[in-house]
Image (tube, rainbow, N blue to C red):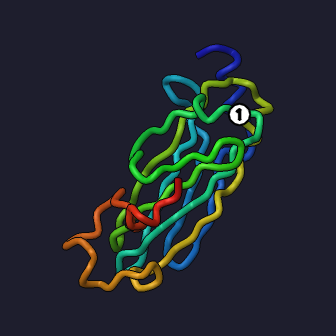
């Protein structure tokens, strides 16, 4: 580990947490093999599957092509100069882990990523689906937004 990488790990805080409607989101700064990484964990304590979406603003000066997705990557959409968004079904009591690695080691840029994403949770009915239209098991990473309605 280089002195610069050791410096990255001293950013405070190193994790943020939010919870909404039985779903917790924890965003942690961790040491990635290719640079500083943010690990994002979604954990459900609900008894029903839910659609989960979070928006994570990116600093305006960051080129989205220098942010590399890791973990569960299906369900991500990036909006240059604005934010990235992740949407998935989260089965009852399940956990999904995703995140991204930054190409930069500039401390000022990394600190601007250390914030709590905006979390939204909805039941199948809230996104216009009936329980019968859900897959037999609402699987991790499956996108609850029908393709015709997906952003982008």
Residue toward you, 83 or 42 = 83
Do we see residue 67 in this rendering? Answer: yes
Please tell me which residue is depicted at 36% across the width and 56% down the height of the picture. Answer: 141
Residue toward you, 134 or 119 = 134
The spot of residue 75 in percent (x, y) is: 43, 53
**Pointer 1: what residue?**
62
The spot of residue 95 in percent (x, y) is: 39, 60
The spot of residue 138 in percent (x, y) is: 29, 69
Please tell me which residue is depicted at 56% across the width and 56% down the height of the picture. Answer: 26
Residue toward you, 46 or 60 = 60
Most extreme residue toward the front is 148
Horizontally, residue 93 falls left or right of residue 42, namely left
Most extreme residue toward the right is 108
Horizontally, residue 82 falls left or right of residue 132, namely right
Horizontally, residue 78 falls left or right of residue 11, namely left
Please tell me which residue is depicted at 42% across the width and 66% down the height of the picture. Answer: 145
């Amino acid at each position: 580990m280089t002195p610069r990488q050791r410096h990255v790990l001293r950013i405070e805080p190193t994790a943020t947490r939010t919870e909404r409607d039985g779903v917790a989101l924890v965003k942690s700064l961790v040491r990635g093999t290719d640079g500083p990484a943010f690990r994002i964990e979604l954990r459900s304590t609900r008894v029903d599957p839910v659609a989960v979406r979070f928006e994570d603003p990116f600093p305006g000066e960051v080129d989205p092509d220098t942010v590399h997705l890791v973990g569960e990557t299906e369900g991500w959409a990036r909006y240059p100069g604005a934010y990235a968004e992740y949407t998935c079904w989260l089965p009852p009591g399940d956990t999904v882990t995703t995140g991204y690695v930054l190409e930069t080691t500039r401390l000022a840029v990394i600190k601007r990523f250390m914030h709590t994403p905006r979390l939204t949770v909805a039941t199948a009915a809230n996104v216009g689906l009936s329980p019968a239209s859900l897959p037999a098991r609402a699987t991790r990473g499956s996108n609850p937004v029908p393709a015709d309605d997906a952003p982008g």
